[in-house]
Amino acid sequence: MAQQIPVDPRCVVDEAAPDGTMQAAPDLSYQRLLLVNVAYYGMPGAKSGSWVLVDAGIPGTYGTIVGAAEKRFGAGSKPAAIVMTHGHFDHTGALKELAEHWDVPIYAHELELPYLDGRSSYPPPDPTVGGGLMARVSSLYPRGPVDVRPWLRPLPADGTVPGMPGFRWIATPGHSPGHVSFWRESDRALVVGDAFITTAQESAYGVLTQEPELHGPPMYYTPDWESARRSVEGLTALEPDLIVPGHGRAMRGPAMREALRALARDFRAVAVPEQGRYVGDPARADASGPTYVPPVKA
């Protein structure tokens, strides 16, 4: 079974903001919604249309997200946009409700659009990768697609992130074809999505305890391991000072960077499962959805 990279607990960003989110930077906070995070860009009290939501949680979290946003930015406030790292069910659970409520654009990489506009489902998860209960029951997880066509837009080709000045999006495929991360060079802040995470997401115990560690993308939902490895190498080369993941706790500092370098260096040994449907035979996709899904291994 793949292993994690331990991280000094002092790297964890655990400052609670008055609105109930976790403050990672003055204009960046995140909120844990059972098993996944959403992030809020914008200074507390920012006027309506001057902040951004990153990802949209699991089903049933619409009210929690709206409530946190109103505490942070004011009653009735709505974002400039919702930006998506990718379109898996645990990041799109409240997306349609939020879009209907706020009526704002939703931005994602063009290779994620088929999973967000009703055209295509993702390749099946792989429950054979091991690691715990979350992996074993992954075949039951929704594969999509969701359909938010009235609000859906491709991320700008120039790398800018609408509503998030100073950030640029970086293609980090592997966990999904159009997965992206958001990078701000001025303070080396990285909203990483699931390109890598800081908890053992395959394990229900790991999800519950949130023990700090550097971990590859969730194994049961990653169909292209070589692309995932290259994405982690590219993000490591940025030398981030702050990481806000899609699963687990935010981290910062030199010890975090050292752990990230170890994850990139030893990715095949510590992140890739010993066996699995997509190990050595990745799924492939284009702008219309999957073009090849490997058969189930005997």
Image: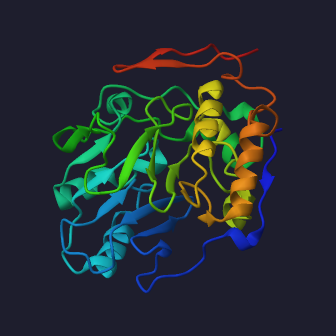
- x and y percent of residue 13 in the render? 60, 72
Left or right relative to 196: residue 203: right
Left or right relative to 193: residue 121: left
Q: Which scheme is used to colour this image of the protein?
A: rainbow
Left or right relative to 167: residue 274: right
| Screen quadrant of the N terminus | top right
Query: Residue at image x 62%, y 31%?
Result: 230
Q: Nearer the viewer, residue 201 or 25?
A: 25
Left or right relative to 46: residue 199: right
Query: Residue at image x 62%, y 39%?
Result: 232
Q: Mark yes or no: residue 249 visible.
A: no
Query: Residue at image x 42%, y 55%?
Result: 59
Q: Nearer the viewer, residue 271 or 234?
A: 234
Q: Nearer the viewer, residue 138 or 102?
A: 102
- x and y percent of residue 56 in the render? 38, 55
Q: Would you place residue 282 above or below residue 212 in this image?
A: above
Q: Nearer the viewer, residue 16 or 209?
A: 16
Q: How many marks?
A: 0
**Residue at the farthest bottom position:** 18
- x and y percent of residue 253 in the render? 66, 65
Q: Mark yes or no: residue 83 visible.
A: yes
| Screen quadrant of the C terminus | top right
Q: Would you place residue 127 above or below residue 28 in this image?
A: above
Residue 241 occupies quadrant:
bottom right
Q: Would you place residue 298 above or below residue 204 in this image?
A: above
Query: Residue at image x 34%, y 19%?
Result: 288
- x and y percent of residue 283 in the render? 56, 19
